Image: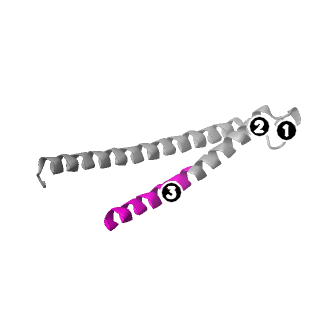
């Protein structure tokens, strides 16, 4: 029982760490999107000001967003795959126990 509790605490700590990293990346991406919206839809004086983005800067920002979203999706898939593998292993163990076999 103590072993199971330790494993669950370890998993929880790992998931909190993954969640924190994802939240930081999401916040960064939201900041980029807001900057692009402000540059595109701001008042005329803001659009024509010295902070106006060039096409290359827009492309770089959009590439950054796409990369960030792809990273988040890949991380989510990795976590989901690990969860599925864990479920399959538990199901096999339960079948062995219910059949009376140890291995």
Circle 2 residue:
39
Quadrant of the snapshot with the C terminus: bottom left
Q: Secondary structure at mark 1?
A: helix
**Mark 3 touching mark 2, by CB under 8 A?**
no
Name which of mark 1 and mark 3 comes first in the sequence.
3
In the rendered image, which quarter is residue 60 located in? top right
Q: Main secondary structure of the magenta part?
A: helix
Q: Is residue 17 left or right of residue 90?
A: right
Q: Residues within 10 Å of mark 2 (few under 14, many from 20)?
A: some
Magenta stretch: residue 48 in it? no
Name which of mark 3 and mark 2 comes first in the sequence.
3
Q: Is residue 6 above or below residue 48?
A: below
Q: Is residue 16 left or right of residue 80?
A: right
In the rendered image, which quarter is residue 62 located in? top right
Magenta stretch: residue 5 in it? yes
Here the colouring is one colour
In the rendered image, which quarter is residue 8 located in? bottom left
Q: Secondary structure at mark 3?
A: helix
Mark number displayed over residue 46 = 1
Task: Quote the CA–CA distance across marks 2 and 1.
Answer: 7 Å
Q: Magenta segment, which residues?
A: 1-22
Tell me where residue 20 appears, x and y as whole percent. 55, 55
């Amino acid at each position: 029982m103590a072993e199971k509790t330790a494993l669950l605490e370890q998993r929880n700590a790992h998931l909190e760490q993954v969640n924190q990293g994802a939240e930081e990346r999401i916040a960064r991406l939201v900041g980029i999107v807001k900057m692009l919206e402000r540059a595109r839809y701001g008042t005329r004086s803001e659009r024509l000001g010295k902070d106006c983005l060039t096409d290359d800067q827009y492309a770089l920002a959009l590439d950054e967003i796409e990369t960030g979203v792809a990273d988040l999706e890949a991380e989510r898939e990795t976590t989901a795959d690990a969860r599925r593998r864990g479920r399959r292993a538990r199901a096999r163990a339960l079948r062995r126990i219910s059949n009376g076999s140890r291995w």
